[in-house]
Image: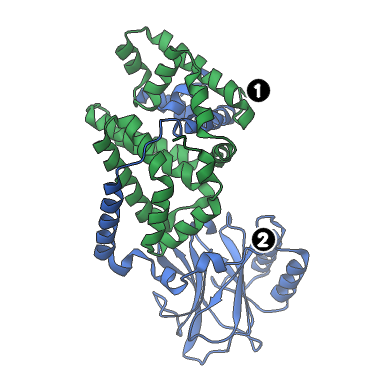
Chain colours: A blue, B green
Amino acid sequence: MIDEHVDDLIDLYALGALESDEQTAVDQHLDECGRCGRLLAETKELVLLLAWTPDQHDPPPVLHDRLMRRVQQLQRLDGDDRQPWWHRLIPDLRRRTPQLTFGLAGVMAALLLFFGSRTVSLQQEVASLRAQLSTQQLVVDVLRSPDTRVVALSNQTGGPEGAAQLLLDPARERALLVTSALPRLPEDQTYQLWLIGNNTPESMGTFEVNQQGVASIVVQANRPLNQFQAVGVSIEPTGGSPQPTNVILLEQL
Amino acid sequence: MVHKVGETANVDVVDEDLIERLARGELAALDALYTRYSRPVFSLALRVLGNSNDAEEVTQDVFERVWRHAPTFDAERGRFGTWLLSMTHHIAIDTVRKRQRRPQTVSGEAAEHATRVLADTREDVAESTLRGMQAEQVRRALRSLPSSQQEAIELAYFGGLSHLEIAAKLGDPLGTVKARIRRGMDRLRSALEGFGVEGDIA
């Protein structure tokens, strides 16, 4: 660990020209020194420009053909597995995901919707006043955050009518899911909520909706939501399933 | 032909569209990205490796990785052009070091370095800097340096050499080499300040 600032080493560090023991020492200093971290960030901007400075030459045309052949070969080997299953379900997902600005009207509407309906905790923890308070605090926190956005889940082909929106601040581990006009399910079926990270669906629990098809759900993940790629709702046998079988709503985060 | 960086930079939105299409397995999108970026990628690899065969291999490797990693490319972590050339640089330097049989586990070291570079959220600033300027002007700034300073910086960045190795190669004292790099980088900072690259911080 170097206690003093490392100005003299920053240029060499950014250029990758330090010996490994020196680099380790600078790394340790950078972990704790914001000032030197900023200096390094600025120096890296400069170093990145160097990548564009060599004389420019076109690669030989044969390289293009070789690359395309190689990738076609890889594509055949990988088959459809290249794309995660949820990508295939939403072929144009990023373009269709509305990055809604969460305006005051939206906040009020969501608050009314949230407090006007029964709060269903997927962890079944909302049984005590403390938990209720915590949940209300979450609502306030999520809505107050300037980074909160609304993700409208897309209805999947063959699924029922109805809608769901996820209110989330991507840096947090908790979010709110609000559904509307989803049909009530027969006793042997339940809705199940999923977060998809690393192409693996993780169950966030099961839930039911009220007569109006509304449910307001606290989503509790074990890590920040920006580490998940998608959110989905499926219909499963009562008790839920280890993997989603009948996905009815899905959207990328 | 003078390559203008602005030619690639004013189509950033289209880059993102192409990556999305590539993530869905559309080979035509890879074709378009290759047309757009193979020239700077190949040129950087050629500058580092010094021969066309190795540069072709690195270029192919880079675009194969683009194809493989398109589904997980995170546009918020840096613009595509910056990401692509950073990756090219690291792969090319790794290749050089392996060729030189440098005794350290350089791939891990380079990977760690790459992670730090790619994790730097300020990288998009460099990209937007590039958008507003031509590569020729960056080259001019580099080439306006005294030749000893330019040589030391280029041996570090394009040669993948440490300061000790540069000193040994040039037969100069280590202190002299470090001072040349420091002065050269300071001059580059001054020359490019107008493009948004800051000088010393307080």
Instruction: Name the residue nearer the viewer: A91 or A242.
Output: A91
* Chain of the residue under the numbered disc 2 shown in the image: A
Could you tell me which secondary element the residue under label 2 belongs to? helix
Please tell me the numbered disc located at residue A142.
Answer: 2
Tell me what residue is drawn at x 41 percent, y 30 percent. Answer: A54
Taking the spot 44% from the left edge, 74% from the top edge, the residue there is A89
Say left or right for B41 vs B106: right
Instruction: Residue at 54% x, 87% y: name it.
Output: A160
- Is residue A18 visible to us here? no
Say left or right for A37 vs A246: right
Residue B9 in percent (x, y) is at 53, 45
Would residue A150 appear left or right of B55 to someone viewing this image?
right
Residue type indicated by callout 1: Ala
**Mark 2 crowd level (few <14, some 14–19, many ≥20, 10 Å Cα):** many
Look at the image and tell me in which quarter the C terminus of chain A lies: bottom right
* Residue A161 percent across, percent down from the top left: 57, 86
Q: Residues within 10 Å of mark 1 (few under 14, many from 20)?
A: few
Q: What residue type is labelled 2?
A: Val
Q: Nearer the viewer, residue B26 or A30?
A: B26
Residue A141, placed above or below residue B125: below
Q: Where is residue B87 in the image (x, y as percent from the top left)?
A: 39, 41
Residue at the disc numbered 1 = B202
